[in-house]
Image (cartoon, rainbow, N blue to C red):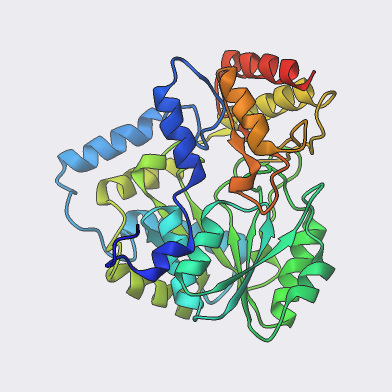
Amino acid sequence: MTHPWIADRTKAFDSSGIRKVFDLAAQMKDPINLSIGQPDFDVPESVKEACINAIRAGKNSYALTQGMPVLREKLQAQVDAEFAHADRRVFVSSGTSGGLVLALLSLVNPGDEVISFDPFFVMYEALVKLAGGVPVLIDTYPNFRIDVDRVAAAITPRTKLILFNSPANPTGVTASEAEIRGLAQLAAERKVALISDEIYRLFQYDEPFVSPARFNEQTIVIDGLSKSHAMTGWRVGFVHGPAELINTMIKLQQYSFVCAPQPAQWAGAVALDTPMDEHIAAYRRKRDMIYEGLADLYEVTKPGGAFYIFPKAPGGSGEAFVRKAIENNLLIIPGNIFSRRDTHFRISYAADESTLERGIEVLRRLAR
């Protein structure tokens, strides 16, 4: 029975299914773990040193709500160089998820519709509901492409924003420049907000990364250092967009998250100057390895970025297939955690090559 004091808004979503898989992993003895959505490399040494030095230098108090100048000014210079928008401002959020929460709370009124794409990052639907919005999901199966005409048809007088993610979690699919331009121009024409979640922008393997902010000055971009520099536990995200909206998000941050951790921001400034090319090249090789290891036996779209691949489950049910995989000591995530469909499963190839080889071996055996 639900406790009578618990607020109704918490009933809009369940505990994350991914969390349940992690809890299961803790009980398994040496599982082949291809479930975790975080890099398997460590934070660069120079970034660790910068954080240690900041702590030792006494930079342990509250940070400025909008972010410390050492990081924020560097980010602003990068954003200005990339987009040259007169009105585009940046602030440092408490993680990318914090940035997403603040963006939705700043934009969504109760009853507003928010368009996103199925499959979707697990937090999207839950956070839209938390803000009082109504999720409108556009199915992108089987190849996970963005059909701009279908988005146009889904826009109603109640549509407040479109929530877009490329490279995408859970599919790893990257939208084409034509899809991104079409989506950006549609949002501008219909006067609908567009949030672009670009946390995987560094992990783009086959063509250069393109942001919809290039084609639509009003685009709100969510980004951070969690995935690019393996700083998932450090909670350093950033958001850039039109100044008035960014100022509203800073105001909300003041009354919620307060600030991102100060020592981590000094380290973040060093992270921005730390090349990650070797790691990106390693992940491109892992992408090729997992795709080539499965493509002859599974129905699967080749991912262009991030570190996920989203094959169709033999037998039709992703959940049933994942149970079978777990019986074979392989941890993967059922696709219905990210989707209204239960037909696929997510593999994270953010793992060492020997773990990947073991995983591929089990998956090939299960497909036969």
Residue 335 image-quadrant placement: top right
Residue 202: image location, x then y, percent: 59, 43
Residue 241: image location, x then y, percent: 53, 70
Height in image: 23 above or below 63?
Answer: above
Going 82% across and 47% down the picture, which residue do you hit? 142
- Tell whether 212 sits left or right of 21: right
The answer to which of 306 and 296 lies nearer the viewer is 296
* Quadrant where the image shows the N terminus: bottom left
The answer to which of 65 and 267 lies nearer the viewer is 65
- Tell whether 355 sits left or right of 1: right
Residue 330 image-quadrant placement: top right
Residue 4: image location, x then y, percent: 29, 67
Q: Residue furthest bottom?
A: 157
Residue 7: image location, x then y, percent: 34, 69
Q: Is residue 169 visible?
A: no
Residue 71 image-quadrant placement: bottom left
- Tell whether 192 sits left or right of 181: left
The answer to which of 55 and 248 lies nearer the viewer is 248
Q: Residue furthest front?
A: 1
Q: Is residue 271 visible?
A: yes
* Quadrant where the image shows the C terminus: top right
Height in image: 343 above or below 44?
Answer: below
The answer to which of 193 and 44 lies nearer the viewer is 193
- Tell whether 56 sits left or right of 278: left
Going 28% across and 51% down the picture, which residue do you hit? 261
Count of all numbered marks drawn on residues in the image: 0
Height in image: 124 above or below 246?
Answer: above
Going 48% across and 64% down the picture, which residue do you hit? 12
